[in-house]
Image (cartoon, rainbow, N blue to C red):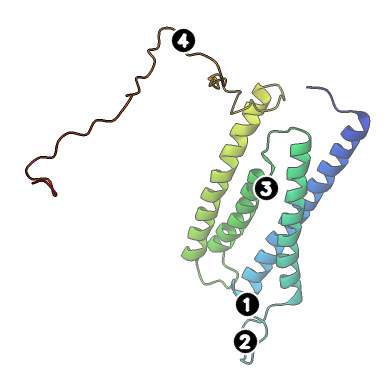
Amino acid sequence: MEPPGLGRLTALWLGTALAAAGVAAGITAVYIGMRDLMVESGGTCASGGPYEIANECSSGQIGLLFGGIVALLVFTALHAAMEHWADGPRIGWPAIVGVLFLALGWNFIDLGLDPPRDDGTSIGWLVSGVVFWLMAVGFLAPAAMRAAEWLRRGGEPEPVVFSQATVRAAAPVLGAQAPASAPAPVVPARLVMPPPGPDDPGSP
């Protein structure tokens, strides 16, 4: 594989650094917004509508959660593009999702063991935290395997899955004679019909 030029290498470094910074900021925003929602509102809130709302969502919670999610989508896509351009190991988005689930799962487990309203252990939050960590392992394990395989190949691209076909069909050539070993088809000169039987319609 030909090494990238200075311009491409610089663009790869800058793009990857920007994507990593954006992903880190997005995960941090979602983590802080979720934690603030759990501490201040018990994990649920609402806004708008004609009814009186017990737990009103603050603008900070909405901005952190939705802004963080949008930033994660945008910068994860940028990181995937940089990986593809650099022929990297394609581990970006599984690793990012795994780290996000780890962070959010820690919120559930930490606040489940020490609830903000001093009402004992919250079993529901603990179960949610364990489920989030199991999902994190489900994303991080394949990412780690891909990274190990990429290192084993020395950074070379993945091998081609479908190689060139080895079986080829020979198309017949118009006007060419058949091989001598193949017998020529026998075509009857005329068609002779058998005499009608007694059960055939129209027989005397």
Given contact means CB atoms under 8 Å apart, are the residues at marks 4 and 3 in contact? no
Residue 121 seen:
no
Q: At 67% from the left edge and 85% from the top edge, which residue is drawn? A: 48
The outermost residue toward the front is 204
Q: Look at discs 1 and 4 and give the one toward the viewer.
A: 4
* Quadrant for the N terminus in the image: top right
User: x, y percentage for residue 32?
Assistant: 71, 62
Given contact means CB atoms under 8 Å apart, are the residues at marks 2 and 3 in contact? no
Given contact means CB atoms under 8 Å apart, are the residues at marks 2 and 1 in contact? yes
Name the residue carrying label 2.
53
Q: Look at discs 2 and 3 and give the one toward the viewer.
A: 3
Given contact means CB atoms under 8 Å apart, are the residues at marks 4 and 2 in contact? no
Distance CA(mark 2)–CA(mark 1) = 8 Å
Instruction: Name which of mark 2 and mark 3 comes first in the sequence.
Output: 2
Hey, what amino acid is under mark 3?
Ile
Q: Look at discs 4 and 2 and give the one toward the viewer.
A: 4
Name the residue carrying label 4.
179
- Is disc 1 placed on a helix, strand or loop? loop
Distance CA(mark 4)–CA(mark 2) = 89 Å
Could you classify mark 2 by the number of other residues whose Cα lies within 10 Å: few (under 14), some (14-19), or many (20 or more)? few
- Front one among 167 and 130: 167
